[in-house]
Image (tube, rainbow, N blue to C red):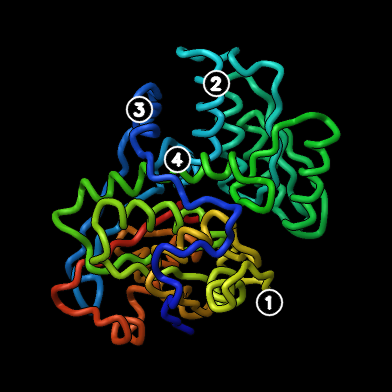
Amino acid sequence: MRLIKNAARGEIKIIDNAPFPSTNVDKVSNLLKKCPIASETPLLELEDFLPHGTLWVKDERGRMGLGSFKALGAAYVIASHAQELDENPCSTTLEGKTYVTASAGNHGLSLAAGAKIFGAKAVVFISETVPESFSDRLREKGAVPVRKGIDYAASMSAALKAAEENDWILLSDSSWKDYIDKPLKLMEGYLQMADEAMNQSKSKASHVFLQAGVGGLAGAVAAHVRKIWGDTPLITVVEPSAAPALQKSIELGKPVLTEGPDSIMGRLDCKEPSFIALNGLARDADYFLTLDDVEVTRCLEKMSKSNLATTASGGAGVAAALNEQVAELLNLGPNSNVLCFLSEIAE
């Protein structure tokens, strides 16, 4: 475990040519009102789960039948594209268009689902290590899986090359130099779960723990928390010790590529941050925390017994809230209200 305080907290941009995250949640909610399968996910309240205080868990496992918050990401971008072409889009609105990405999980499923609804094609590059069962899930959603590369970075390079060669639409859930607009819109979709959680809660949270890979979820939620709840909640970003991309970037004041072994928190095992998320979290987050695999996995059984079954990635924020050392350092007490996000179903 390693906890650092964010010395950059405030209105400072780390990357000048990248924006802060969007906070236009009305745009998201207005579009979702047109989706017949869209509905709120629950905010669970557990009074005796934490050693200190009350835990509020925003449960994203049932989001739109896709099993994770990512249903609000790529599918939202594709739906927005369809609405730009037709105020009342249908199953043929995006015929002839192809969306491509690299994914080992929920982002690819969201892209596949969104493309299928509006008649577009979806191509998802996966690395050699991704299980064949995930390829099958992509096919079930109508996507074409393409196995390429030894790891995620290699499969993303292949997706980028395919987009350029075939005039396909690259839709990544990260952002980098000269690739901003689509991930900015994608992160905007995540505002919906933050807005729901804040409307469902009885009061302001005192502490918010946000798990992060490239930082899309954390950046979007933190921006909305600051917009609605102001400076009061302590926001802590939680990463695997093997992939402290955001923590190291905050310390050095610039985006950095980190190195480390693979983590059991596979969805969070990202060695490089999203530029948009990094800007937002430099402004909005109070602390950056890394947890070892063992510190997270030992919490999963307790979570499962409380009907919070998830993966190590999905439960990293809750694991941070359960950590006694973290609780002491961040002054969690009997009157604390702690907000976390259960971001995906168990596997």
Q: Which amino acid does label 1 sit on?
A: Gly
Query: CB of mark 4 within 8 Å of CB of mark 3?
Result: no
Identified at 38% across, 58% down, the residue is 222
**Viewer-proximal residue, 133 or 289?**
289
Query: CB of mark 1 within 8 Å of CB of mark 4?
Result: no
Mark 1 and mark 3: Cα distance apart in space: 42 Å
Instruction: Classify mark 3: residues with Cα within 10 Å, few (<14), some (14-19) or many (20+).
Output: few
Image location (x, y in percent) of residue 269: 61, 65
- Residue under label 3: 30
Q: Check residue 82 in the rendering and tell me which mark sits there, or answer none.
A: 2
Identified at 62% across, 39% down, the residue is 137
- Residue under label 1: 260
Q: Which of marks 1 and 3 is nearer the N terminus?
A: 3
Mark 4 and mark 2: Cα distance apart in space: 15 Å
Identified at 76% across, 53% down, the residue is 127
Q: Which is in the foreground here, disc 1 or disc 3?
A: 3
Q: What element carries label 3?
A: helix
Q: Which is in the foreground here, disc 1 or disc 4?
A: 4
Residue 177 lies left or right of residue 322; in this view the side is right
Instruction: Classify mark 2: residues with Cα within 10 Å, few (<14), some (14-19) or many (20+).
Output: many
Identified at 40% across, 59% down, the residue is 309
Instruction: Name the quadrant containing residue 276.
Output: bottom right
Q: Which amino acid does label 2 sit on?
A: Ala
Instruction: Classify mark 1: residues with Cα within 10 Å, few (<14), some (14-19) or many (20+).
Output: few
Residue 338 lies left or right of residue 217; in this view the side is left
Q: Which of marks 2 and 3 is nearer the N terminus?
A: 3
Query: CB of mark 1 within 8 Å of CB of mark 3?
Result: no
Image location (x, y in percent) of residue 200: 20, 47
Q: Earlier in the sequence, mark 1 or mark 4?
A: 4
- Residue under label 4: 189
Q: Earlier in the sequence, mark 4 or mark 3?
A: 3
Mark 4 and mark 3: Cα distance apart in space: 11 Å
